[in-house]
Image (cartoon, rainbow, N blue to C red):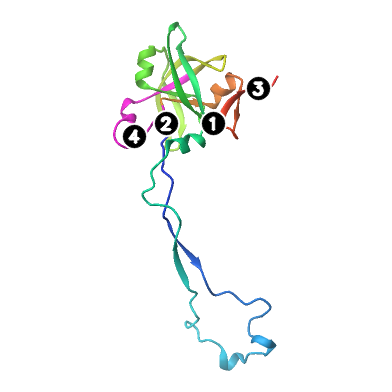
Amino acid sequence: SAGARRFPGLGGSSIRRLRGGEVPAGSAPGEREGGEKQDEDTEKTPAGEQDEPEYEEEEVDGDEEEDYDEEDYEETHTYADVEFINPTNSSKRVMVRGLVDTGGTDCDLRAALVRKLDLPVFDEEEEYETAAGTLKTKSYRALISCMGKEAEVLLCAVPDEAYEGDDPECEDDAIIGHDAIADLDLLIDCKNACLMQRPS
């Protein structure tokens, strides 16, 4: 993944709900109330003249201009404080709050931070499968430290332009993939949206 976008919740949506056209309980086709049989030859509704069911539009509660609350977003996603370290020079390190993404294999890190750490290149054209198809991009080696655990990971640099504009493509400085979580031997607490130590 190349980052996580933040989408405001939907509000004020209009729905159409069926209000008619139901067969009364206890009655069968061709039968009047009280059990009297209907004369199919004389009372049959001509084709194309059946009663149309009524539809009523209702507004779902909620303001169309509802402000997006970042706290609500974080409550439904798992974040972790992770330190990225240059594996050949441990004095170069940076602490970030990263989004845990179990749908991604490796990690992503903001390109500006990759340059700051001066991370060594692992592969000039690493291939990744994405929703848009196969992506070839440069990958880097790094150490990550989280909750007292340390592991070596591969990561991609998220271009600086992905963070620009009023509606940026990416808003998270780092994405933590499932390989990194496994190598750190940490578990995901889905209920509390956090990482946790494996019980001994």
Which circle's residue, 2 or 3, is located before the other in the chain? 2
Disc on the earlier residue, 1 or 2: 2
Q: Earlier in the sequence, mark 4 or mark 1?
A: 1
Q: Could you say where residue 42 lies in the image, as x and y percent from the top left? A: 57, 94
Helix, strand or loop at disc 3?
loop
Which residue is disc 4 drawn over? 168
Gap in Å between the C-alphas at discs 1 and 3? Answer: 17 Å
Residue for point 54% across, 22% down: 180
Q: Quadrant of the C terminus?
A: top right
Q: Residue at x 41, y 28 (%)?
A: 172
User: Badges 4 and 1: C-beta atoms under 8 Å apart?
Assistant: no
Camera-nearest label, 2 or 4: 4
- Residue 157 magenta-highlighted: yes
Estimate the spatial distance between the alpha carbons at disc 2 and disc 4, rounded to whole Å: 10 Å
Callouts 2 and 3 close, C-beta under 8 Å: no
Q: Are marks 2 and 4 in contact (CB under 8 Å)?
A: no
Residue indicated by mark 2: 3
Q: CA distance from mark 4 to mark 1?
A: 22 Å
Q: Nearer the viewer, residue 22 or 10?
A: 10
Q: CA distance from mark 1 to mark 2?
A: 13 Å
Residue at image mark 3: 198
Q: Which residues are magenta?
A: 154-172
